[in-house]
């Protein structure tokens, strides 16, 4: 199947009970058994639920994987990956990453004896010097949040394989519409399905996809043992969102290109971070491993004044000032005080997250309205 067909049919079967085209919401905790263990594959909904399983199958199909796992949030999915590790293990992570991931790594798992190295990965060769006999995982976001750095998945995968280290890729920003990390050599793909996969700002959900059965079985055990699963209603909402992922992402990409080009020429804008620019670091890698350049971008204003940046985002009317991203509506955020507030200021600024940085999640509205909104907010 081509991707645009996969989002609608991939991994999906008609419901066996009545032939329902859309997967029913099996809002149940438990299932009748004819004798102990005599059930139809479902005993308790923390372990298995038909609606969640349908979503997990769809996720695996989209990412060209064999096994999908759905969780209560993206962070719950990341938490499951980290539980593959033991005290003394080490992780090499990109240094420009979602603040919640950084918080989970440093304030939760460091306490359990796991060591993290936060490294600039624009040149994949820089990763190798941080790998030793204790390294068990490389954690990558690409494009990164919020600086839109591009990391070469294929080159990083080669390094991981050479050292027998797992490679996990947070594919939230790109979505499987734009890139499929498993096909480029990654072992684990993670999504905050809250974002583009759900696509309508109405559900919180996380996902993992893998190819290897041994790895999948370990993660299924953690999923069931820790219990951070999503409910059937949330599973249904993401299943529904996935069916329009391709048409939404196409418009997100088109609108983001228009807005990035506009901001680049604006007299009050200092820098624009969007992988589609030819002078963007690793633009050629983005062009090679992505179908398009995504709906996310960031920009900073001249003078790098915190208060001025706040004034700009407060003036926006079509763009909504809000956490999160990836919905049909355009959102604006201030990373230094919102998504990355948990990252110390000194560490933020090392990666370019300055006080005036504004992150845009460009929605699928009419581009003229979005441009007019930015024009009036920037003055």
Image (cartoon, helix red, strand yellow):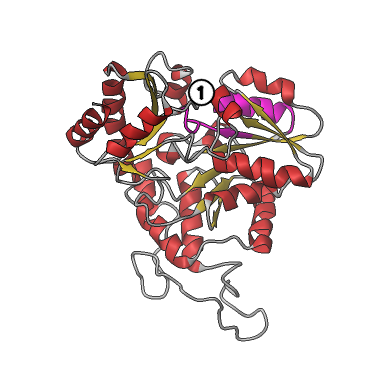
348 left or right of 214?
Answer: left
In the depicted structure, whether residue 242 falls above or below residue 24:
above
Considering the numbered disc 1 on the image, is that residue within a helix, a strand or a loop?
Answer: loop
On whether residue 218 falls in the magenta region, the answer is no
Q: Is residue 292 visible?
A: no
- On the image, the x and y values in percent for residue 150 come to 50, 25
Residue at 59% from the left image edge and 45% from the top image edge:
210
167 left or right of 145 in image: right
Identity of the residue drawn at 66% across and 41% down = 105
In depth, the one of 143 and 95 nearer the eye is 95
Q: Do we see residue 137 in this rendering?
A: yes
Look at the image and tell me in which quarter the C terminus lies.
Answer: top left
Q: Which residues are magenta?
A: 139-164
Is residue 140 on the magenta stretch? yes
At x 74% / y 26%, what residue is drawn?
131
Along the viewing direction, whichever of 146 and 187 lies nearer the viewer: 146
Q: Nearer the viewer, residue 367 or 8?
A: 367
Quarter occupied by the N terminus: top left
Residue 95 falls left or right of residue 326: right
10 Å neighbourhood of mark 1: few (<14), some, or many (≥20)?
few
x, y (%) of residue 215? 68, 48
Could you tell me residue 16's position as x and y percent? Answer: 42, 71
Q: Quadrant of residue 349?
A: top right
Look at mark 1 in the image and give the residue it sits on.
352
Is the residue 16 above or below the residue 350 in the image? Answer: below
């Amino acid at each position: 199947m081509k991707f645009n067909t996969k989002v609608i049919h991939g991994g999906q079967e008609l419901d066996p009970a009545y032939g329902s085209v859309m997967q029913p919401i099996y809002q149940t905790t438990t299932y009748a058994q004819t004798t102990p263990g005599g059930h139809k594959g479902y005993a308790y909904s923390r372990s298995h639920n038909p609606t969640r399983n349908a979503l997990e199958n769809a996720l695996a199909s989209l990412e060209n994987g064999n096994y999908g796992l759905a969780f209560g949030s993206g962070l719950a999915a990341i938490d499951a990956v980290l539980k593959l590790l033991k005290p003394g293990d080490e992780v090499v992570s990109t240094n420009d990453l979602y603040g919640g991931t950084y918080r989970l790594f440093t304030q939760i798992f460091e306490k359990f004896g796991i060591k993290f190295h936060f490294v600039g990965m624009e040149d994949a060769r820089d990763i190798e010097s941080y790998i030793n006999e204790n390294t068990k995982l490389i954690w990558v976001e690409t494009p990164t949040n919020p600086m839109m750095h591009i990391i070469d998945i294929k080159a990083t995968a080669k390094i991981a394989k050479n050292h027998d280290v797992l490679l996990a890729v947070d594919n939230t920003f790109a979505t499987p519409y734009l890139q499929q990390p498993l096909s480029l050599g990654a072992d684990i793909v993670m999504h905050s399905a809250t974002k583009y996969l759900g696509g309508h700002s109405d559900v919180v959900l996380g996902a993992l996809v893998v190819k290897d059965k041994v790895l999948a079985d370990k993660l299924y055990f953690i999923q069931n043992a820790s219990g951070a699963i999503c409910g059937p209603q949330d599973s249904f909402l993401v299943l529904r969102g996935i069916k329009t992922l391709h048409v939404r992402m196409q418009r997100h990409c088109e609108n983001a290109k228009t807005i990035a080009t506009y901001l680049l020429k604006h007299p009050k804008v200092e820098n624009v971070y969007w992988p589609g620019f030819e002078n963007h670091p690793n633009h050629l890698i983005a062009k090679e491993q992505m179908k398009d350049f995504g709906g996310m971008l960031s920009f900073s204003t001249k003078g790098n004044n915190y208060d001025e940046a706040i004034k700009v985002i407060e003036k926006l009317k079509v763009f909504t000032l809000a956490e999160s991203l990836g919905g049909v509506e355009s959102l604006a955020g201030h990373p230094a005080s919102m998504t990355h507030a948990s990252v110390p200021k000194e560490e933020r600024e090392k990666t370019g997250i300055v006080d005036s940085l504004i992150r845009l999640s460009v929605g699928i509205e009419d581009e003229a309205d979005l441009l007019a909104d930015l024009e009036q907010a920037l003055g």
